[in-house]
Image (tube, rainbow, N blue to C red):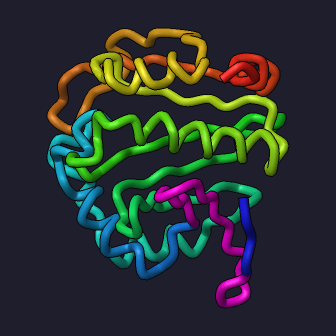
Amino acid sequence: MKGNYFCGVKFLFIEKGNILIRNAILSDAKILYKWWNDGKIMLHAGFPNGLGITVKEIEEDLKNDTDEKGRRLIIEYEGQPIGEMSYRNKGSKTVEIGIKICDFTKQERGLGTIILQMFIRSLFEDYKFEKVILDTNLNNRRAQHVYKKIGFRKVKINYDSWKDQLGELQSSVDYELLKAEYLNFTKDK
């Protein structure tokens, strides 16, 4: 992880080869607007019609991001934005994360696994979190495969626990990854 200052704000990024994970900045609101309002991209999050959010609303949300509370991040591959991530400090050295590879041509290429590994290592080593948690739609088998491959442990399945934008019942899976387990899991890889 590297740190620089941009307009007085610490600007963090994680870089490996052609992959860059960086803070989302105000000028990213337009690409986030495009992605978050696309029902195909937001389907697994329960928004088949997109979020219906404005650029201005996204800009306001980005202004409230901090390293301590949480941030939205942009994933770049070969210099182009391909997706987004987020983290939220939940207290007790626990962080909740989310990830979306929004460029469909970059899915199914192993990038999600690499990006998550980069991000998780930084959360454990640089931010000193001890546990990473996340959830995903029970139908999102591709994401579950990636989480298992990285070492996440399935904690709970929440059957018919929420309704999507169309009023259809959805189920989700809760995952967690402890720092000690992750370091042990990755030491031989």
Front in this rendered view, residue 131 or 77: 77
Give the quadrant of residue 77.
Answer: bottom left
Q: Is residue 88 above or below residue 45?
A: below
Is residue 94 in view from this perspective?
yes
Q: Position of residue 155 (x, y in %)?
A: 58, 11
Taking the spot 75% from the left edge, 23% from the top edge, the residue there is 187
Q: Is residue 133 left or right of residue 185?
A: left
Front in this rendered view, residue 71 or 12: 12
Quadrant in which the C terminus appears: top right
Front in this rendered view, residue 58 or 129: 129
Q: Is residue 73 above or below residue 189?
A: below
Q: Is residue 14 left or right of residue 178?
A: left
Taking the spot 68% from the left edge, 67% from the top edge, the residue there is 12
Q: Position of residue 74 (x, y in %)?
A: 47, 61
Q: Is residue 82 above or below residue 40?
A: below
Is residue 178 in view from this perspective?
no
Quadrant in which the N terminus appears: bottom right
Front in this rendered view, residue 120 or 33: 120
Taking the spot 66% from the left edge, 85% from the top edge, the residue there is 6
Taking the spot 76% from the left edge, 58% from the top edge, the residue there is 68
- Over which residues does the magenta segment extend? 5-22
Q: Is residue 142 above or below residue 61?
A: above
Taking the magenta stretch, the answer to whether it contains residue 8 is yes
Give the quadrant of residue 71.
Answer: bottom right
